[in-house]
Image (cartoon, rainbow, N blue to C red):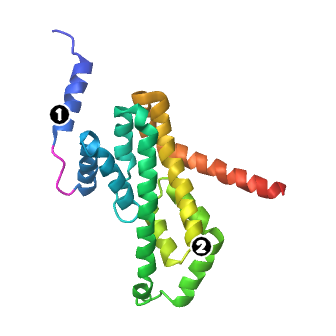
């Protein structure tokens, strides 16, 4: 009996799994595949901008999904793609802010939501809002939740803008920079460790600010 080629068998199984249609209920996966399909489209950069804009206020798929293959396909334009992502995302954050701001009167009609509670939220955002928005902008925390909440709390718009800009630029330039330096070999590393790296970076940054404050 000839030996069984485990590598070929595994590859055949993987190919068979990949060929299976996505279930109709798997809406998130369908959206993911749809976003990824723009990677080889002639208007891929425009799609990246629009995706970044929408994700900051209501769309569930992060722009990293499209940013990564675009950077792999054209390493020389990686930083440009990161810039497109950053600008689109920050502009979209204003839409999220407006959505939250416009929902205040509607929210007051919901039981257990009072003007006193909104005032407490506003006070909390006056103190720590910049950190909340920055951390959400940089890490896997859904950014749209904080942009809408910031509008709901009537956060200072200048501080909101700076927190969004610094956090989003840090996230997207990190991805673009890694691909610019390493290229396609970075993809498995990004897929496996990106979220962890973002969290570690944020913890180090917060620790650094805390240390500076303690020293003074």
Mark-to-mark CA distance, 1 and 2: 50 Å
User: Circle 1 sits on which residue?
Assistant: 16
86 inside magenta stretch: no
Q: Residue at x 65, y 48 (%)?
A: 204
- Please indicate whether residue 29 sits to the left or right of residue 126 in the image: left
Give the farthest residue toward the top. Answer: 1
Q: Secondary structure at mark 1?
A: helix
**Picture coordinates of residue 209 (x, y %)?**
71, 54
Instruction: Give, as a single range, the part of the protein colored magenta.
Output: 21-25
Q: Secondary structure at mark 2?
A: helix
Q: Reply above or below: 40 against 129.
A: above
- How many neighbours does mark 1 have within 10 angstroms: few (below 14), some (14-19), or many (20 or more)? few
Q: Residue at x 78, y 58 (%)?
A: 213
User: Circle 2 sits on which residue?
Assistant: 125
Instruction: Depth check: give the residue in front, 48 or 142.
Output: 48
Instruction: Depth check: give the residue in front, 160 or 152.
Output: 160
- Please indicate whether residue 37 sits to the left or right of residue 175 in the image: left
- Quadrant including the C terminus: bottom right
- How many neighbours does mark 2 have within 10 angstroms: few (below 14), some (14-19), or many (20 or more)? many
């Amino acid at each position: 009996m000839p030996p069984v080629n485990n590598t070929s068998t595994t590859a055949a199984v993987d190919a068979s799994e990949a060929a299976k249609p996505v279930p109709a209920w798997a809406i998130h996966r369908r959206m993911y595949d749809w976003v990824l399909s723009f990677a080889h489209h002639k208007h891929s950069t425009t799609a990246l901008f629009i995706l970044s804009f929408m994700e900051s206020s209501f769309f569930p798929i992060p722009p990293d999904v499209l940013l990564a293959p675009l950077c792999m396909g054209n390493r020389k334009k990686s930083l440009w793609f990161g810039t497109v992502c950053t600008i689109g995302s920050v502009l979209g954050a204003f839409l999220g802010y407006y959505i939250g701001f416009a929902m205040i009167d509607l929210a007051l009609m919901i039981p257990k939501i009072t003007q006193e509670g909104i005032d407490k939220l506003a006070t909390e955002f006056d103190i720590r809002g910049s950190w909340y928005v920055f951390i959400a902008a940089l890490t896997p925390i859904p950014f749209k939740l904080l942009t809408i909440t910031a509008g709901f709390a009537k956060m200072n718009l200048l501080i909101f803008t700076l927190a969004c800009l610094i956090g989003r630029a840090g996230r997207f330039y990190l991805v673009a920079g890694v691909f610019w330096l390493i290229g396609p070999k970075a993809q498995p590393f990004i897929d496996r460790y990106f979220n962890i790296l973002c969290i570690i970076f944020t913890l180090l940054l917060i620790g650094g600010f805390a240390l500076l404050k303690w020293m003074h």
